[in-house]
Amino acid sequence: MTAKQLADRLQVSERTIYRDMQDLSLSGIPIESEAGVGYMLRHSLDVPPIMFDSNELEAIVLGVKMIKAWSGNELSQSAETALDKIEASIPKELRKNIESSKLFVPAFAINSLHKANFESLRQSINNKRVVKVSYQKLDGETSQRLLRPLGLYYWGKVWTLVAWCSLRKAFRVFRVDRIIKLEVTDNQFQDMPGQSLDDYIEIQKRLYQTHSDFDENMNYGQ
C-alpha cells in the first residue's frame, strides 16, 4: 500500500504515515518500502494481547461490580461489556480467577430514581448541558435550581454533584439521592474562568488546608 492509500484510509496526512512507518521499522516491525510500490509486510505478524496477572484481574472485576452496584444502568452495562471483552481475550486458566472471585458488592446502594438521575447527570457533564433540578435539603425544604453540572463524587455512601449554581452564583454540592426531579435542558454551557471543576478543586484544596472539618464546608444544596 502506498502512503497516500494509507493516509486516505486512516484520515491522516502522508507526513504522519512516513513518520509512523519509520517508528514502526525502528521498533523491529518488518516493514519494507519501495519507491513507486509502497509499503510491504512480507511476513505475518502477531501482536501479543494485553495480559493481566491475577491481582489485576481481581481489581478489574471488583471495579465492575462497584460500577454495577453504585452507578447508572448505562455505565453498568458498559462495564459488563468491557469485562466480557477482557474475559474473551485472556487464557482459560485466568478466566477462572474472574469466575471464582470472592469479592462482593451488594447492589442495594442506589434506587432506580437515583440510578436514573446519576445517568442523566453523567451525560449532562459530558455534553455540558444545563440541568434543572428540584432538590430537597436536609431540613426537608425543597428548592428549584438551574445548574451547570461539573463532576460526580462517590463518598462510600452517597454520590454528590459538584455544580455551578445560577441561583447562588457560586459552586454548590448536591447529594444525588436528594434530587427529587431532574430535567436536562437543551442549553449548553462553556467553562468560564473561576467557574470550572478545576477552580472548584483548587478552592477545596485551600479549605482542606485551613479547616479540620472538611465536610462542614461542603454546604450541601445551600
Image: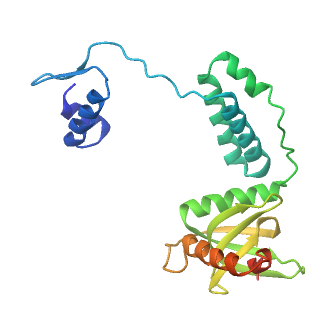
Residue drawn at the location 85% of the way across and 53% of the way down = 109
Asked whether 197 or 201 is in front, the reply is 201
Asked whether 5 or 194 is in front, the reply is 194
Residue drawn at the location 81% of the way across and 57% of the way down = 156
Residue 43, given in percent of the width and then of the height, sits at 31, 12
Quadrant of the drawing holding the N terminus:
top left
Residue 187 in sight here: no
Residue 210, given in percent of the width and then of the height, sits at 70, 81
Residue drawn at the location 73% of the way across and 51% of the way down = 72
Question: Outermost residue, left direction?
Answer: 36
Question: Outermost residue, bottom direction?
Answer: 168
Q: Is residue 111 above or below residue 87?
A: below
Q: Is residue 71 above or below residue 191?
A: above
Q: Is residue 120 above or below residue 182?
A: above
Asked whether 24 or 206 is in front, the reply is 206
Residue 5, given in percent of the width and then of the height, sits at 22, 31
Q: Is residue 97 above or below residue 151?
A: above
Residue 166 appears left or right of 20: right
Circle count:
0
Which quadrant would residue 167 be assigned to in this image? bottom right
Residue 157 appears left or right of 83: right
Residue 26 appears left or right of 119: left
Asked whether 177 or 43 is in front, the reply is 43
Residue drawn at the location 67% of the way across and 77% of the way down = 209
Quadrant of the drawing holding the C terminus:
bottom right
Residue 4 in sight here: yes
Residue 14, given in percent of the width and then of the height, sits at 20, 40
Colouring used for the render: rainbow
Which quadrant would residue 207 be assigned to in this image? bottom right
Which quadrant would residue 153 be assigned to in this image? bottom right
